[in-house]
Amino acid sequence: MRIAALLLFFFSYSALAAGLPVRVLLEKTTLAEVKLSGAYSLWSWNGRIAESAVGDTYRLLAGGKGIELACDSPPCARQGEVGNLISFVPKSGQVEVNGRSYRGYLRVLWRDGEMLLINKLDIEDYLRGVLPGEVPASFPYDVLRAQAILARTYTLSRLGSDPDYDLCDTSACQVYLGKDAETSKHDRAVAATKGRILAYHNKPIAAVYHADSGGKTAAAEEVWGSSVPYLQERSDPWTLKKHWRLTVTPSKVQAALADVGYGATAVRAAEVVSRGESGRITAMAFDTGSGRLVVRVPKLTRVLYALGLPSSLATLRGWTFDGRGSGHGVGLSQWGARGLARKGWNYREILAYYYPHVVLTHYQLRVSR
């Protein structure tokens, strides 16, 4: 049975009137290469400090007190120490960082002896570099449209989450591959859903998603310990259900427990003691030199991740886990959505299935004074 279309309404989101900027952390490093292929300007806390009508290539070094610039082919617009912030603003709207091209501009911050490389760009341009890293162009177009809406929603929910940046560029946030990864099909999905997000009680939802549920998606409490009305267990019959097997060692289990704050001595045995509705492990007991230790989600989720389990939908025999799926299992399953789309479901129906009780809406930009 198909799901009814979601309701549509509008809410305001305070931002710049010209567009919604996003700050993406590309890397924390002590060395970097920045290439500008055309005219550009350099900015610091005091405003514009230099400009050039031609492109240059810079080597950046995190010095003891700030950022140091060296130029591949002097003279360049600026060299030497530049303090704890420098922004590379290309007139073309494209900058190359460590061999990868990005839209927008690059901001470099010096923090405690290392540099934060931050790409600042419009949210819609950002999504053009996200979608190719999350779902392949070979997936049905409605999956790409659903993914674009989820990625946009997730981005809004992360704005201001850190003083220096909003998101990282890895799967810990959303995979972001920059301009070089863009394709016409992914671009079309972003443009077709421009400004559209999922909301619950007039706020962007926690738009989490994953690759393969293994046959059932998880409720939020099975993974993170807290219930969320729109993140519930769902049957996912058309997902990949990829099987995996992983053998761990007692010493690795001990190290994983220590990483989350348990000072356990040698681990002698482990067993699953409870599961959630989807079948995922929600609590385990460990026989240690200090006695029996029971660990529950959400800390258990971190332990299993540290052990390298692709998902928590698994059984345990001895020190060997057998499981299905890939990812935390909450929200949309990308392979499951592919199956639904191939059965004829559109992106609205797919989103309504994986995220009950939410509404499909647009956000609007408003200048706060």
Image (cartoon, helix red, strand yellow):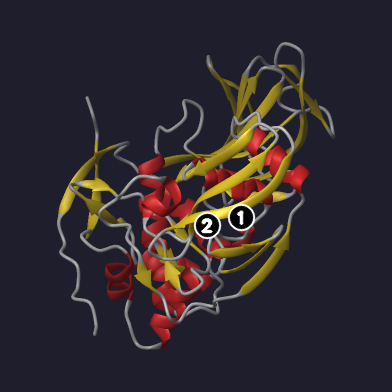
User: Is residue 220 found left or right of 306 in the rendered image?
Assistant: left
Quadrant position of the C terminus in the picture:
top left
**Residue 111 in which image quadrant:** top right
Which residue ends up furthest to the bottom in the rendered image? 343
- Residue ID at (72%, 11%): 65
Callout 1–callout 2 Cβ contact below 8 Å: yes
Q: Secondary structure at mark 1?
A: loop
Q: What residue appears at the point 30 percent right and 62 percent down from the top-left corner?
A: 355
Q: Is residue 216 left or right of residue 135?
A: left
Q: Camera-side residue: 154 or 369? A: 154
The residue at which mark 1 appears reads as: 177
Q: Is residue 40 above or below residue 326?
A: above
Q: Could you say whether the residue bearing mark 2 is in a helix, strand or loop? A: helix
Is residue 178 at all visible to an observer of this figure? no
The residue lying at 64 percent from left, 38 percent from top is 257
Please name whichever residue, 367 or 223, is drawn nearer the observer in this view of the structure. Answer: 223
Name the mark on residue 234.
none
Read off the residue under disc 2.
Answer: 130
| Mark 1 surroundings: few (<14), some (14-19) or many (≥20) residues within 10 A | many
Residue 181 at what x, y percent from top left?
62, 62
Three-letter amino acid code at the position of disc 1 = Leu
Residue at the extreme top: 65
The x and y percentages for residue 35 are 72, 41
Q: Measure the alpha-carbon separation of dots 1 and 2.
A: 6 Å
Q: Amino acid at mark 2?
A: Val
Note whether 180 is above or below 26 in the view shown. Answer: below
Up/down of 1 relative to 55, above or below? below
Q: How many badges with numbers are in the image? A: 2
Instruction: Name which of mark 1 and mark 2 comes first in the sequence.
Output: 2
Q: Locate residue 199 relative to residue 187 in the image: left or right.
A: left
- Looking at the image, is 47 positioned above or below residue 316? above
